[in-house]
Image (cartoon, rainbow, N blue to C red):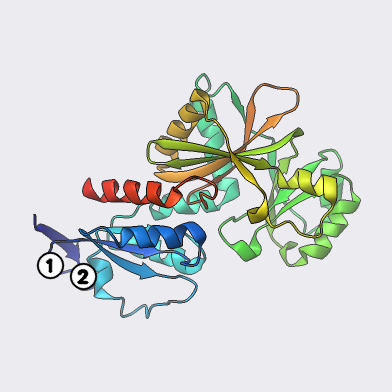
């Protein structure tokens, strides 16, 4: 059936348009393996008009945004850079439906804010989440290096992580086992010494990283060797995590419950998080969460995402 679509244009005038197809504005780096396949499948849906945008290549004149944006039935953004964030702000200003809204994405991209939010969730659902733990964490700056070294001397080993996690070129995880490693970090990431960093205690685990991917009400599990343990064993100069072999990991009912709670409390429809199992406990630590992960390793991930998006837009 034809649907009536109301929206506010830049002059605040309400307009009505008629459309047989639902319009999806999809902003993502389009050479991403899963995204490329997903786009192909979305184009096959007859009642969807797909508008593609690559935030690394396409930029808008802010005073003359394309009218088709205001007619969007759903905006999907896989954040790559500030252009991605700008689009989500625009969607909020003009009340455009989004898969994940700007508040959710800003929370998830900021590791420190996200840490606060997850800790609150764990307190609220203490009984439901008794099989899961959170590592100790801190917010610190290396601008006063001697002060930082004095502070960190009683916390080792730790993992220093970038405050923001959506910028590929400004993202890092750096293991510090001894004080000399601080100097190595400062040399390698000297441009970050004036900024605060997110720090987690290092959890001695079984060397396996469990990656949990959530697409709507479906939960998938993939496991791979933990990159930090690869470094500890082989000491490579760099580790390309995309080349680490992955295997299917059976998702337990406890993990499904955690996924459902995180989805509800963080307002996430699709997302992923990482779990590690300590050597001396039958529990898991949650160490990372991403609002739009790679979904790498999930069989037919593109089809699962396509089916979810198709169903989601039908119920808007």
Q: Which mark is residue 50?
A: none
- Is residue 243 visible to us here? yes
Q: Secondary structure at mark 1?
A: strand
Foreground: 138 or 41? Answer: 41
Q: Secondary structure at mark 2?
A: loop
**Mark 2, residue position:** 9
Would residue 211 appear left or right of 59 to someone viewing this image?
right
Residue ranking furthest to the right: 180
**Mark 1, residue position:** 15
Instruction: Provide residue 49's location: percent of width, then percent of height.
Output: 25, 64
For marks 1 and 2, the one nearer the N-term is 2
Instruction: Provide residue 314's location: percent of width, then percent of height.
Output: 22, 48
Q: Residues within 10 Å of mark 1 (few under 14, many from 20)?
A: few
For the point 24% across and 72% down, the residue is 10
Would residue 56 appear left or right of 151 to someone viewing this image?
left
In this view, 14 is above or below 298: below
Would residue 308 appear left or right of 254 to someone viewing this image?
left
For the point 37% across and 62% down, the residue is 40
Instruction: Provide residue 274's location: percent of width, then percent of height.
Output: 59, 40
């Amino acid at each position: 059936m034809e649907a009536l679509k109301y929206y506010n244009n830049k002059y605040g005038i309400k307009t009505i348009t008629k459309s047989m197809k639902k319009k999806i504005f999809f902003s993502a780096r389009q050479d991403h393996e899963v995204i490329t396949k997903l786009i192909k499948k979305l184009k096959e849906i007859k009642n969807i008009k797909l508008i593609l945008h690559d935030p690394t290549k396409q930029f808008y004149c802010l005073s003359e945004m394309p009218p088709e944006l205001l007619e969007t039935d759903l905006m999907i953004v896989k954040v790559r850079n500030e252009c991605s964030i700008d689009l989500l702000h625009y969607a909020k200003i003009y009340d455009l439906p989004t898969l994940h809204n700007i508040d959710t994405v800003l929370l998830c991209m900021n590791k420190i804010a996200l840490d606060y939010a997850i800790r609150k969730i764990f307190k609220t659902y203490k009984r439901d989440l008794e099989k899961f733990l959170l590592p100790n964490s801190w917010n610190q700056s290396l601008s006063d290096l001697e002060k930082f070294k004095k502070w960190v001397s009683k916390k080792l080993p730790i993992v220093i992580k970038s405050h923001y996690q959506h910028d590929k070129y400004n993202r890092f995880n750096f293991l510090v086992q001894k004080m000399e490693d601080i100097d190595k970090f400062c040399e390698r990431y000297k441009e970050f010494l004036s900024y605060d960093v997110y720090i987690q205690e290092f959890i001695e685990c079984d060397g396996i990283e469990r990656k949990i991917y959530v697409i709507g009400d479906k939960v998938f599990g993939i496991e791979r060797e933990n990159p930090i343990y690869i470094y500890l064993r082989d000491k490579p100069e760099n580790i390309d995590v995309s080349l680490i072999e992955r295997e299917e990991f059976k998702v337990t009912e406890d993990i499904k419950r955690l996924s459902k709670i995180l989805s509800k409390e963080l307002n996430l429809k699709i997302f992923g998080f990482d779990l590690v199992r300590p050597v001396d406990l039958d529990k898991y630590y949650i160490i990372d969460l991403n609002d739009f992960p790679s979904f790498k390793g999930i069989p037919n991930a593109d089809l699962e995402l396509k089916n979810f998006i198709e169903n989601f837009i039908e119920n808007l």
